[in-house]
Amino acid sequence: MNDAFSIAGIPIAGRVLLAPMSGVSDLPFRRAASRLGAPYVVTEMVACETLAQGRADVVRRAARSDDIALTVIQLVGRETQWLATGARIAEESGADIIDINMGCPAREVTGGLSGSALMRDLDQAERLIAAAVGATQRPVTLKMRLGWDDTSKNAAALAVRAEGAGVRAITVHGRTRQQFFKGASDWRAVAAVKAATRLPVIVNGDIVDATSAREALAQSGADAVMIGRAALGKPWIAQTVASALKSGSAMVEPDLDARLDIILDHFRDSLAFYGDRLGLKTFRKHLARYIEDAPLAQSPASRRAAKAHLCALDLPSAVEHGLVALWQETCADIAA
C-alpha cells in the first residue's frame, strides 16, 4: 500500500488513522498512540460554545503536545458564530487541522441539533462549514455518517456541499445515525461519496484489523481508513494495521513485556495530565481493555476478577503493583 497521502498539502505519514472518541482520545491516549506510530489521531469531540467559555474540561479535550507531530482538533456545534469562534480558538491552540463533527449519533448531541442531526438540514450544515472555514487559516475537514436513516442517505450530497464550502477532506462512518453502532458498516456506500467529490475520503466503521482495513479500502475506494473503538486498549493498532497492509503479512502486536511498558507509560501520563484522582478514574476504561485484550494465561474468570480488582483500586501505586504482579503471574505460568 502506498503511504503517500496528504490533506490540503499537509503530509500524513500513513493511511491508517485514529478516530475521535469521547472519553477515549484524550491527550495521554493520543500521546501513547503517536509514540507507537499513529500518524493521525483526532481529539475528543470539543463543543465550541463551552470551549469559548473556557470550561476547563472542554479546554482540556483540545490540549496539544509537542510529542504529537500532527494536532487534529474536532469541533461540534449548531450555531455559525460558535463554529467560527471554535475554529479560531482551535487554530490559536495549535491545531494543524480542524475537523467538524456531523456524525456523532448520541442523543445528547443530536437532541441539541448537532452531530449527525445536521444531516437532516444540509443548508445549516453548509452554513456551519462555511463559518468554520472562513474563520481559520487551517484546513477544515468533515466527519459524517451515511445519513440520518435508511430513507435519507445523503452523505454524497453533503460531501458536494462541503467541498464547495471549503472542506479539504471527508471521513464517512458507514452507518446511518439511526443505526448507532448496530449492524454492519456499509463500506460500499462510502464509494458514492468518493465518486461525488475530488477530496480525500476516509472510511470509518468496523475496521478492527488489517483484513477489515483492506476490505474497507477495496469496497469504498477511499484514500485511507479510520479506526475507532478497536483502538481502545490497543494504541499501537494504527501502526500494526499499516505494517500488515504494506507487507501483506499477519499483524504483529506487542508482546507481554512491551504491553506492560505501554500500559504503565500511558497510566503515568494520565496521572501527570489530570492529577492522581481524576487520572486514575479516567484511565480505568483503558486499563480494563488493556487487561481484556492482553494474551494473559489466566482463565476468563480469573482475568475478570483481576480486572475488577485493579479497576476498583484508589491508589496509583497499588494499581502499578497489581499490574506488575498480574503480568509476572502470567510469565511464571509460561515458564512452568
Image: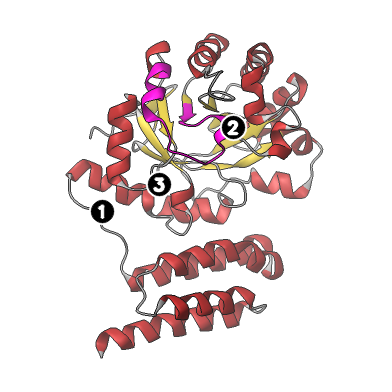
Q: Is residue 302 left or right of residue 91?
A: left
The residue under label 3 is 38
Is residue 252 placed above or below 260 in the rendered structure? above
Of the numbered discs 2 and 1, the one sitting upstream in the chain is: 2
Q: CA distance from mark 3 to mark 2?
A: 30 Å
Q: CA distance from mark 3 to mark 1?
A: 15 Å
Q: Which mark is residue 251?
A: 1
- Seen at 54% across and 41% down, the residue is 20
Q: Find residue 118 and report its horizontal and vertical position in percent.
A: 65, 22
Element on which disc 3 rests: loop
Farthest residue toward the bottom?
Answer: 336
Element on which disc 1 rests: loop
Q: Is residue 204 left or right of residue 22?
A: left
Q: Is residue 186 visible?
A: yes
Q: Quadrant of the N terminus?
A: top left
Q: Find residue 285 and report its horizontal and vertical position in percent.
A: 57, 62
Q: Which mark is residue 178?
A: 2
Count up the numbered dots: 3
Magenta segment, which residues?
171-193
Identity, as a three-letter code, of the amino acid under mark 3: Ala
Asked whether 154 falls inside the magenta stretch, the response is no
Of the numbered discs 3 and 1, the one sitting upstream in the chain is: 3
Element on which disc 2 rests: helix
Of the numbered discs 3 and 2, the one sitting upstream in the chain is: 3
Q: Of the residues tagged 3 and 2, which is closer to the observer? A: 2
Based on the displayed image, in which of its 4 quarters is residue 327 positioned?
Answer: bottom left
